[in-house]
């Protein structure tokens, strides 16, 4: 749902880059889970927060000093999946797409989804494989997303 960028201010607040469609979406959840490099996740309770431009600044229970807040730099933030609203048909949570294999209509491997980014116009798949590929996640190119098979099929040439 986001990543801690840095400590914010002198009272132990965190500056967070949200990965939500709306920057304030993260603030709708009282319990956040923190983890780093795929390590152990631990829950923290949100006391207060606000949107500041494209970032979120938040105060979490138990973090009172900027030195303590700084220890959370580069930690990822997640929420319980059960707390998320269901998505509409043809829409996906980004985290559901990460790690999926991607092939084109000829069956050629384009890599796997490393992460996604938003360029303002649409979401973009960032694929890792023989090379990095950036592919717009739009109906024009997305033929099928099969979460059960963990596979995305795209109308995209191997040499694009």
Image: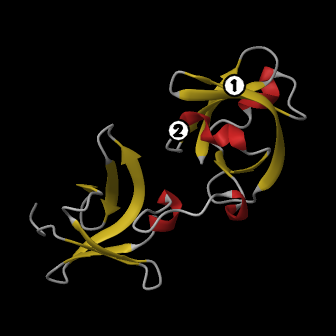
> Which circle, 2 or 1, is nearer the viewer?
2
Alpha-carbon span between mark 2 and mark 1: 22 Å
Picture coordinates of residue 147, whole percent (x, y):
45, 78
Residue 23 vertical position relative to residue 43 in the rendered view, above or below: above
Q: Which mark is residue 22?
A: 2
Q: Which is more toward the observer, 8 or 45?
A: 45
Are circles 2 and 1 on residues that touch, CB within 8 Å? no
- Residue reaching furthest to the right: 62
Q: Identify the image quadrant of residue 49.
A: top right
Residue drawn at point x = 70 percent, y = 54 percent:
79
Q: Which mark is drawn over residue 53?
A: none
Query: Residue at label 1?
Result: 7
Determine whether, in the image, residue 151 is placed left or right of residue 105.
right
x then y, percent, for residue 95: 52, 61
Q: How is the image coloured?
A: secondary structure
Front residue (pair 151, 158):
151
Residue in the picture at 16% in, 70% down: 155
All told, the count of numbered labels is 2
In x, y percent, where is residue 58?
73, 29
Q: Residue at x 29, y 67 (%)?
A: 129
């Amino acid at each position: 749902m986001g990543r801690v960028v840095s400590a914010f201010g002198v009272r132990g607040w965190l500056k967070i880059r949200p990965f939500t469609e709306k920057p304030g979406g993260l603030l709708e959840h009282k319990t956040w889970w923190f983890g780093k490099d795929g390590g152990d996740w631990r829950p923290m309770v949100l006391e207060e927060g606000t949107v500041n431009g494209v970032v979120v600044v938040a105060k979490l229970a138990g973090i009172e000093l900027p030195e303590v807040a700084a220890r959370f730099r580069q930690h990822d933030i997640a929420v319980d999946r059960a707390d998320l609203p269901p998505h509409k048909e043809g829409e996906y949570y980004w985290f559901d797409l990460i790690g999926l294999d991607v092939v084109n209509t000829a069956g050629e491997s384009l890599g796997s989804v490393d992460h996604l980014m938003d360029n303002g116009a649409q979401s973009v798949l960032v694929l890792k494989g023989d090379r990095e590929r950036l592919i717009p996640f739009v109906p024009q190119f997305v033929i099928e997303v099969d979460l059960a098979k963990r596979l995305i099929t795209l109308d995209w040439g191997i040499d694009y």
